[in-house]
Image (cartoon, rainbow, N blue to C red):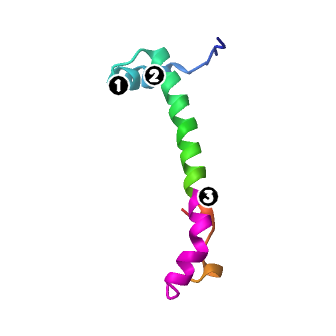
Amino acid sequence: MPSLNVSFSEEEMEGVRAAAAAEGKSLKAYLHDLGVREMHRKRFVAGATAWADRLRGEFDEAFPDEVPPAGRGHGAAAA
């Protein structure tokens, strides 16, 4: 199984240890879960953005008095 060595300053390591302890996890489990959570978060945001983009036209038709499409940002960058 692949593994990774990560370097931290003393101050950073102290903060990471405290965060792991606050969640009741070992340092290894905490850092593993942190990376996996971020991967899942990015996948969720991409899916939610695609869903919103698919429904944008329907929303604009249903609510014509809302912000005009040209005046609205697109996708996650607008949030």
Q: Is 30 situated left or right of 47 in this image?
A: left
At horizontal 39% and vertical 26% (from top left) the residue drawn is 19
Instruction: Report whether residue 52 is seen.
Output: yes
Q: Is 18 situated above or below 42?
A: above
Q: SS at mark 1?
A: loop
Q: Is residue 64 magenta?
A: yes
Asked whether 27 or 13 is in front, the reply is 27
Residue at which label 3 appears: 50
Query: What's the distance in space between the residues labelled 3 and 2, CA to CA?
Result: 30 Å
Image spot of residue 79 (x, y percent): 54, 62
Image spot of residue 35 (x, y percent): 55, 29
Q: Within the image, what quadrant is residue 8 found in?
A: top right
Q: SS at mark 2?
A: helix
> Is disc 2 in contact with disc 1, using a CB cutoff of under 8 Å?
yes
Q: Quadrant of the N terminus?
A: top right
Mark 3 Cα within 10 Å, few/some/many (few <14, many 20+)?
some
Q: Mark 2 vs mark 1: which is more N-terminal?
A: 1
Q: Is 72 situated left or right of 66 in this image?
A: right
Q: Mark 1 vs mark 3: which is more N-terminal?
A: 1
Q: Is 62 situated above or below 33?
A: below
Residue at which label 1 appears: 23
Image spot of residue 38 (x, y percent): 54, 37
Residue at which label 2 appears: 30
Query: What's the distance in space between the residues labelled 1 and 3, CA to CA?
Result: 33 Å
Q: SS at mark 3?
A: helix
Q: Is residue 40 magenta?
A: no
Query: What's the distance in space between the residues labelled 2 and 1, CA to CA?
Result: 8 Å
Mark 2 Cα within 10 Å, few/some/many (few <14, many 20+)?
some
Residues in magenta, as a range: 49-66
